Amino acid sequence: MNSGFFILIILVLFLVWLFLVRPQRRRHQAHEAMVDELRVGDEVLTAGGFFATVRSVTEDEVVVELSPGNEARLAKRAVAAVLPPEDAVEPEAVPEPTEEARR
């Protein structure tokens, strides 16, 4: 009975690691890589929900422009996402109306 209980505890700990710790570590590594790749001119989304343009990058901080002439200093960890350039986003294609819809 003791060995069965021990194996069950080990199995539960492995499942916790597999489903909770490992994905969190991957997200953290992906965020660190994204922050390390920040460049001047990148459009970012901050953790506070502001859309901004990166103006300068230092070791731990980023200066972003929230609106023309309005800059803010942020910790790098406050950058939630780097947005793709607007010219890289293709507009959605509008489907052609069918023959029945035209009537």
Image (spheres, helix red, strand yellow):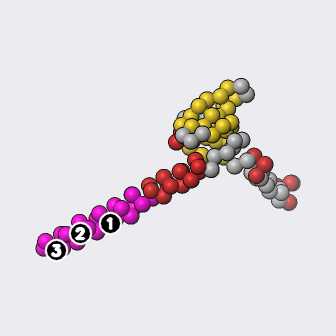
- Depth check: 38 or 16 in front? 38
- Depth check: 64 or 88 in front? 64
Q: Report helix, strand or loop for mark 3.
A: helix
Residue ID at (63%, 46%): 38
| Residue 81 is inside the magenta segment | no
Measured in 3D between alpha carbons, the distance from the residue under mark 3 to the one under mark 1, in whole angstroms, is: 16 Å
The spot of residue 3 in percent (x, y) is: 16, 74
Residue 21: image quadrant is bottom left
Q: Earlier in the sequence, mark 3 or mark 1?
A: 3
**Which residue, given by chain and number where applicable, does mark 2 sit on?**
8
How crowded pointer 1 is (Cα within 10 Å; few <14, some 14-19, many 20+) is rated as few
Q: What mark, if any, has residue 3 been given in the picture?
A: 3
Q: Earlier in the sequence, mark 3 or mark 2?
A: 3
Q: Mark 3: which amino acid?
A: Ser
The spot of residue 88 in percent (x, y) is: 76, 52
Is residue 100 something one can see in this rendering?
no
**Which residue, given by chain and number where applicable, does mark 1 sit on?**
14
Residue ID at (74%, 51%): 89
- Residue extent of the magenta highlight: 1-23
Q: Quadrant of the N terminus?
A: bottom left
Image: 75 above or below 38: above
Is residue 18 something one can see in this rendering?
yes
Of all residues, the one furthest to the front in this rendering is: 59
Q: Mark 2: which amino acid?
A: Leu
The spot of residue 25 in percent (x, y) is: 44, 56
- Depth check: 1 or 21 in front? 21
Q: Report helix, strand or loop for mark 1.
A: helix
Q: Report helix, strand or loop for mark 2.
A: helix
Q: Quadrant of the C terminus?
A: bottom right
How crowded pointer 3 is (Cα within 10 Å; few <14, some 14-19, many 20+) is rated as few
Disc 2 vs disc 1: which is toward the camera?
1
